[in-house]
Image (spheres, rainbow, N blue to C red):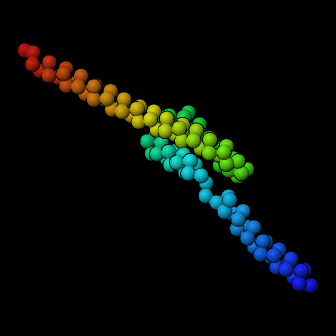
Amino acid sequence: MTGLRTFFLALVLVATHVPAAMAQSRGAPPPEFERARQALSAALAEGADVHASREFAAAEALLQESRAAGERRRRGEQVALAERAELEARLAEARAITLRLRAEVEAKAEDNQRLRRELLDGALP
């Protein structure tokens, strides 16, 4: 009788810890996933969804694939996809910033050209 009791007690103790252990193993995503998510947010803040839509869409897709790999418990694949997503997001952010700065430079160049014409036209009798 004591052997059976001990068996059931051990079974109950194990059964109470298994769900907690399973939840913990699925717990927090790897830090690479969080960095990719943050890089995607930074790219979005710079307007990459408009100015670098191809790279931004690729980063979003890779992040979703990374999430799916995590759900399938393929941690190595999840990390690799998250790293690629971060790189694509950073590329999208850089392209968006570059296009914005290029537009600002062109606008200033046009203003300078207009001022030169006004000065030259006003200086000539």
User: Does the image show residue 89?
Assistant: yes
Across and down, in percent, residue 45 comes to: 45, 45
Q: 76 or 82, which lies in front?
A: 76
Q: Given the current orientation, which residue lies at the most extreme left position?
A: 125
Q: Determine whether, in the image, residue 121 is placed left or right of residue 71.
A: left
Q: Quadrant of residue 84?
A: top right
Across and down, in percent, residue 71 comes to: 70, 52
Q: Given the current orientation, which residue lies at the most extreme top position?
A: 125
Query: Residue shown at 73%/70% (left/top)?
Result: 17
Q: 74 or 114, which lies in front?
A: 74
Q: Quadrant of residue 107?
A: top left
Q: 101 or 113, which lies in front?
A: 101
Question: Looking at the image, is 41 positioned above or below residue 120?
Answer: below
Q: Given the current orientation, which residue lies at the most extreme front position?
A: 3
Q: Determine whether, in the image, residue 23 is placed left or right of residue 12.
A: left
Q: 2 or 88, which lies in front?
A: 2
Query: Residue shown at 32%/27% (left/top)?
Result: 106
Query: Residue shown at 62%/41% (left/top)?
Result: 80
Across and down, in percent, residue 83 comes to: 57, 41
Q: Quadrant of residue 81?
A: top right
Across and down, in percent, residue 24 comes to: 66, 63
Q: Locate the C terminus and report the quarter of the image it occupies.
A: top left
Query: Residue shown at 83%/74% (left/top)?
Result: 11
Q: Given the current orientation, which residue lies at the most extreme bottom position?
A: 1
Question: Looking at the image, is 6 positioned above or below residue 22?
Answer: below
Q: Locate the N terminus and report the quarter of the image it occupies.
A: bottom right
Question: Looking at the image, is 9 positioned above or below residue 88?
Answer: below
